[in-house]
Image (cartoon, grey):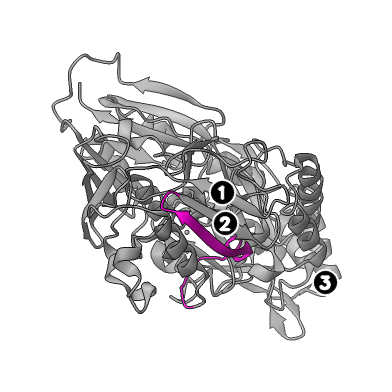
Amino acid sequence: MNLRAATRVLAYALALCSAVAGSGCTHIGGAAHGGAHAWTIPGTLRWADGEDLDNLNPLLSTQTIVNDLSAFTMGYFFLFDDRNEPVPSLCVTFPTTANGLISKDGRSLTFKLRHGVVWHDGAPFTSADVAFTVKTILDARTNVLTRRGWDEIVRVDTPDPHTAIFRLKRPYAPFVNVFFTPVGNPAILPKHLLEHVPDINKAVYNALPVGLGPFKYVRWDRGSQVVMEPFDRWWGGVPKLKRVVFKVIPDANTVLSQLRSHELDLYVRAPNYQQPLLREVPNVRMAEHDTTSYGHIDFNVTTPTLRDVRVRRALIYGADLDKMWRTVDHGIGRREWTPISHLSWAYNPNVARYPFDPAKAAKLLDEAGWKMGTDRLRHKNGETMRLRFAGNVGNIGLDTRVLILQSVYTKLGVELEYFRYPTNTLFAGYAAGGIVAKRHYDMASYAWSLAPEPEPLNLYGCDSISPKGQNYLGYCNRAFDRLAKDALRTYDRERRKRDLMQAQTILANDAPTMVISQRSDRLVYNDDLRGPAAGPSMIFWNVASWTMGP
């Protein structure tokens, strides 16, 4: 599942795990050597994550891993580098008002496309593919994650094969996050393969997409692995890796075991509780990097119990978030109270905070009419305070976090029931019956990532309540909406900053979510691998230049 600004709409399978703040690279197991290890397969990268896959078309998936795989295979206007700056990919120039590619009224964006680009099947890539993809996204029958931002487009003009002009209803400041970048999810689709497909949601294409990236899909063995090979006609030159194998390994301890046994070369987003063990693995490097992701526990505010803000605040006061951070995250990352990263120009450090205070939590529950009974549980109007917590299987860090919650909530008279689901079930889209998307929970734990130009409406806006968007909480505050929407309509950075800082204040006061930490992440990889330079928004932005071997 991750949710951009478009919000990066991906939920992390290893939910609520952070890593050391800052960035750096540590070699483990002695000095680097001159030749390849015996277990290294020259030119082959083997890596894993904890998510199984629902499909491979990022247009239709909420999953972080689908986004990762798409960075290898799919086509985007821009990528984001290790400094979180946009890097031209299929577009050769970034639109600005200064270069005239943003019109004076802010309602036309011109994208100049790279010449000589072909699809993996050899067909030429043109502006017609861009226009077709926008049309597909805007088609109400397409099960896209969100149309936030895309719904600003009136039409796409294609005056020539290498120019696409987006005509907008009004200015849209965070366009770089949404319009065909990996943090915005949808990749460009091949018109020649899909224009006559009656239902894109059920297209065979989704299981093995034809893309524009440096690597092409070879096969997907469901529940097991995805295999990719270099595309020798890629516009940037032939990638240096000869084979990439992604393994589906739902259990984090199994991933660690395979890293130790050298069956894997790369482990992404390694959970914090494994850090001491990872540091003992020989002949690997550990690269730590900041992200714009945040771990959180959401409330389903549409339920009668959690509709009352006093109850939500009580549950945050009653959650020992600092202990969770120390115990589960090993004090890694940054304890925070707002979704927008401290790396961002829009970060507000002064929002409301709810430090651990069981007495205050009990008082708020009393005020809300939830009285402690002789059974040591709270009751109101014949109802017992019993909350359903949803998480994903194979997540030991989350299991520990829930145990901490249960221990303190029990003393408050709150019963917390823990339900664990396969990751692809927990984070499936609304139409597919996803647990969080359909709000089949009272509390749920995962992580979102906001894009370089933060735009929180897709996660918290009234018009984005699922199935319309990824507001899986059912939260709605019109004052928050007005501020967040105003931040979309101006290219004036200072005005946008004022809007978003006030919006964060409202969100923290309403307490529909409890932020645990701003995440840092880590890559742990075979020290025969060269090239990884993960950034706050993308891990695989430069994967075409990676090499494996001496």
In the image, the segment drawn in magenta is 141-162
Residue at the extreme left: 38
- Quote the CA–CA distance across marks 3 and 1: 54 Å
In this rendering, position of residue 198 left or right of residue 304: left
- Judge whether residue 172 is colored magenta: no
Residue at the extreme right: 367
Residue depicted at 51% across the width and 49% down the height: 183
Earlier in the chain: of badge 3 and badge 2, it is 2
Q: Amino acid at mark 2?
A: Phe
Mark number displayed over residue 402: none
Residue depicted at 37% across the width and 77% down the height: 199
Q: Amino acid at mark 3?
A: Ala
Say which residue label 2 marks.
166
Q: How many marks can you see?
A: 3
Residue at the extreme front: 159
Could you say whether the residue bearing mark 3 is in a helix, strand or loop? loop
Q: Are marks 3 and 1 in contact (CB under 8 Å)?
A: no
Q: Nearer the viewer, residue 273 or 123?
A: 123
- Quote the CA–CA distance across marks 3 and 2: 50 Å
- Few, some or many residues within 10 Å of mark 3 (<14, 14–19, 20+): some
In this rendering, position of residue 102 left or right of residue 53: right
Q: Is residue 137 visible?
A: yes
Q: Position of residue 156 (x, y in %)?
A: 53, 61
Could you say whether the residue bearing mark 2 is in a helix, strand or loop? strand
Q: Are marks 2 and 1 in contact (CB under 8 Å)?
A: yes
Say which residue label 1 marks.
110
Say which residue label 3 marks.
368
Question: In the figure, residue 378 lies in which quadrant?
Answer: bottom right
Question: In the figure, residue 548 lies in which quadrant?
Answer: top left
- Quote the CA–CA distance across marks 2 and 1: 6 Å
Q: Is residue 450 visible?
A: no
- Judge whether residue 152 is colored magenta: yes
